[in-house]
């Protein structure tokens, strides 16, 4: 994994992963960045070479728009998947609190 914070993207498995920052009406949505326990973490917590789980959607040009990115403790094999609820449960996309 490579991180490009100034340009709001990561390279994961040779795919460009775009961080989302979307305004829909009065709500603003951003890519949810979390550790393996589901706790919100800053982009600066991610380091080159770490394992991550990305949930999002593919854009027409092949990039991935990330809805959520989870930092993993390492490679997660089939027997360990059950330890991490985010592999099977899709949380609601939480709007970012806005300041008036």
Image (cartoon, helix red, strand yellow):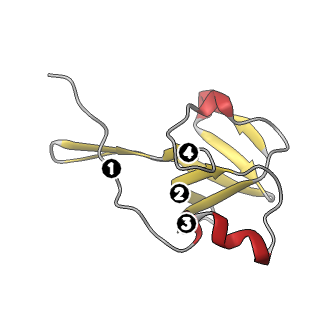
Q: Nearer the viewer, mark 2 or mark 1?
A: 1
Residue 34 — which label?
4
Q: Earlier in the sequence, mark 1 or mark 4?
A: 4
Label 3: element kind: helix
At horizontal 55% and vertical 66% (from top left) the residue drawn is 85
Query: In front: 71, or 7?
Result: 71
* Residue identified by numbered label 1: 94
At horizontal 61% and vertical 51% (from top left) the residue drawn is 70
Residue 52 placement (x, y as % from top left): 71, 53
Q: Earlier in the sequence, mark 2 or mark 3?
A: 2
Q: Earlier in the sequence, mark 2 or mark 1?
A: 2
Give the crowd class for mark 1: few <14, some 14-19, many >=20 residues within 10 Å. Answer: few
Label 4: element kind: strand
Label 2: element kind: strand
At horizontal 54% and vertical 43% (from top left) the residue drawn is 33
Estimate the spatial distance between the alpha carbons at disc 2 and disc 3, rounded to whole Å.
21 Å
Give the crowd class for mark 3: few <14, some 14-19, many >=20 residues within 10 Å. Answer: few
């Amino acid at each position: 994994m490579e991180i490009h914070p100034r340009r709001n993207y990561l390279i994961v498995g040779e795919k460009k992963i775009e961080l989302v920052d979307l305004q829909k009406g009065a709500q603003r949505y951003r890519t949810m960045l979390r550790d393996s326990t589901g706790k919100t973490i800053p982009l600066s917590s991610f380091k080159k070479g770490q394992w991550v789980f990305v949930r999002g959607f593919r854009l027409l040009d092949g990039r991935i728009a990330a809805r959520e990115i989870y930092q993993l403790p390492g490679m997660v094999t089939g027997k360990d998947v059950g330890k991490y609820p985010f592999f099977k449960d899709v949380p609601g996309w939480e709007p970012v609190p806005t300041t008036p």
